[in-house]
């Protein structure tokens, strides 16, 4: 059964890697493509709408149920579903990303006897940035589960030293089984201001009412409290009269499933203060239409992808003095760091950049240099590959090397979508080279 999923053919990589994520698992496709000459990949995610992304890239996709809530029955279902899938797939290595997938994916992989289990925690999230009663209760349940997952793993990867230190001091991660890889990496060759579709960018500027000489200030994130959405809206209110040329734009989906969701009254305030475009797919055009990029996050970020993307697109940055966020900003060189939760500090920083086009241009040039030098996908790919090779070598002969290679060779079409019972949904697509 597992052969059908992995698309065994003559001469291809034999080592099987299953990438497990949540509704954003498609963000790992570039990593999978870059390593596809050395490993045979499949992806597992909780949003069936993302299947087409894997299909187009030529990778099998397996759907499993998982939600962002705190229902223990739902979590148990995710665990057993993943464990069954992983046992049937028989991967040599499971690499799970994000908060809940990194718990249940790793525990399921360990329970299924996978030789190598890795987890990446791209930030500690709102569970460690908020301290209200509900969050504290959830954290008391979550942290022991994360401890079990980390101790059941061969490696836990963090995106900044602060997160690693906090988990190590709390005994969540075992000594000697941790690493830091700064961010998820970005395709700086793709997110390149020199390759910008200027017509698409101009269309976005017209959409938000920006005229010649206006300054578009953009924030892009999930619409939850700890991302600093309310601070962004209130800074826009403060700057409305003193900086009439500024156009404040918010991009991202309203996440009402989150414990950190905004109230209806807060959402009304956001709509009155900024232009909220909702969730968009034309993110390159939005970056191209932007003059200043802002992420006033209160969240325990890893290294925020949106900051990496904005830097790659050559934008001046304003973000908070927090682990992960400050990794992308060299203050005074490519952006400004502010105190988290300080609306007046945010307004001062944004207002200063709105008023100084020469400074914006200098910061923009430096952002691009920093992204290319430190956060290009190749940096992450090389570090990840070294960990895969080392741990697989320590684990011994990969299962994929024992697969019988006779008969037709290609036992399944690459880029196929499966549900947890491993029956094809009939969704197929072309293979693209990685």
Image: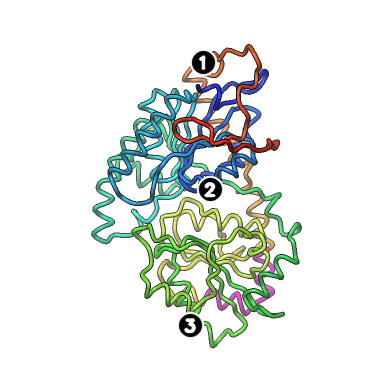
- Using the rendered image of the protein, determine whether residue 144 is visible from the camera's viewpoint: yes
Figure quadrant of residue 65: top left
Check disc 3: other Cα within 10 Å, few if <14, some if 14-19, many if 20+.
some
Magenta stretch secondary structure, dominant: helix
Task: Tell me the residue that label 3 is attached to.
Answer: 238
- Which residue lies most toward the bottom here? 241
51 with respect to 222 (left or right): right
Q: What are the residue bounds of the magenta stretch?
A: 348-364
Task: Tell me the residue that label 1 is attached to.
Answer: 397
Tell me how many marks there are: 3
**Which mark is first along the chain, 3 or 1?**
3
Task: Tell me the residue that label 2 is attached to.
Answer: 49
Q: Mark 3 to mark 2: distance in Å?
A: 39 Å
Q: Is the residue 291 above or below the residue 314 in the image?
A: below
Where residue 383 appears, as percent x and y from the top left, is 57, 36
Q: Mark 1 to mark 3: distance in Å?
A: 62 Å
**Which mark is first along the chain, 1 or 2?**
2
373 with respect to 398 (left or right): right
Where residue 69 appears, as percent x and y from the top left, is 34, 51
Q: Is the residue 36 above or below the residue 292 in the image?
A: above
Q: Is residue 283 magenta?
A: no
Q: Mark 2 to mark 1: distance in Å?
A: 35 Å
Q: Are marks 1 and 3 in contact (CB under 8 Å)?
A: no
Quadrant that contains the C terminus: top right
Q: Which residue lies at the image location 60% right of the left edge and 79% below the top edge? A: 246
Check disc 2: other Cα within 10 Å, few if <14, some if 14-19, many if 20+.
few
123 with respect to 219 (left or right): left
Check disc 1: other Cα within 10 Å, few if <14, some if 14-19, many if 20+.
few
**Which mark is first along the chain, 2 or 3?**
2
């Amino acid at each position: 059964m597992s052969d059908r999923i992995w698309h065994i053919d003559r001469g291809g990589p034999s080592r099987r890697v299953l990438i497990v994520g949540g509704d954003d698992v498609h963000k790992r496709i570039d990593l999978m493509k870059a390593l596809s000459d050395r490993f045979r990949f499949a992806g597992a995610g909780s949003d069936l709408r993302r299947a087409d992304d894997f299909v187009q890239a030529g990778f099998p996709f397996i759907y499993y149920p998982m939600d962002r809530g705190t229902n223990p029955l739902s979590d148990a279902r995710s665990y057993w579903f993943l464990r069954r899938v992983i046992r049937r797939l028989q991967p040599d290595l499971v690499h799970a990303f994000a908060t809940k997938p990194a718990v249940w994916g790793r525990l399921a992989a360990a329970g299924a006897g996978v030789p190598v289990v890795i987890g990446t925690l791209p930030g500690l999230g709102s569970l460690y940035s908020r301290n209200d009663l509900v969050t504290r209760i959830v954290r008391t349940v979550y942290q022991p589960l994360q401890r079990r997952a980390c101790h059941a793993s061969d490696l836990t990867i963090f995106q900044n030293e602060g997160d690693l230190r906090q988990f190590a001091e709390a005994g969540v991660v075992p000594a000697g089984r941790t690493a830091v890889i700064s961010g998820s990496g970005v395709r700086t060759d793709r997110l390149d201001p020199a390759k910008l579709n200027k017509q698409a960018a101009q269309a976005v500027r017209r959409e938000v009412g920006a005229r010649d000489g206006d300054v578009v200030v953009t924030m892009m994130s999930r619409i939850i409290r700890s991302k600093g959405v309310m601070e962004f809206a209130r800074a826009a209110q403060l700057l409305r009269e003193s900086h009439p040329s500024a156009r404040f734009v918010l991009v991202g989906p309203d996440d009402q499933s989150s414990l950190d969701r905004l109230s209806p009254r807060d959402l009304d305030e956001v709509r009155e203060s900024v232009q909220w475009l909702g969730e968009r797919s034309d993110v390159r055009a939005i970056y191209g239409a932007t003059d200043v990029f802002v992420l006033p996050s209160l969240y325990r970020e890893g290294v925020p992808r949106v900051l990496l993307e904005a830097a790659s697109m050559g934008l001046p940055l304003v973000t908070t003095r927090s682990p992960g966020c400050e990794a992308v900003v060299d203050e005074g060189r490519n952006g400004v760091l502010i105190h988290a939760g300080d609306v007046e500090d945010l307004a001062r920083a944004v207002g200063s950049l709105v008023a100084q086009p020469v400074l914006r241009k200098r910061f923009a040039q430096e952002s691009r240099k920093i992204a290319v030098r430190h956060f290009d996908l190749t940096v992450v790919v090389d570090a990840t590959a070294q960990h895969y090779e080392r741990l697989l070598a320590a684990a011994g002969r990969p299962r994929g090397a024992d697969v019988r290679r006779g008969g037709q060779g290609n036992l399944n079409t690459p880029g196929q979508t499966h549900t947890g019972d491993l029956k094809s949904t009939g969704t197929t697509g072309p293979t693209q080279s990685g």
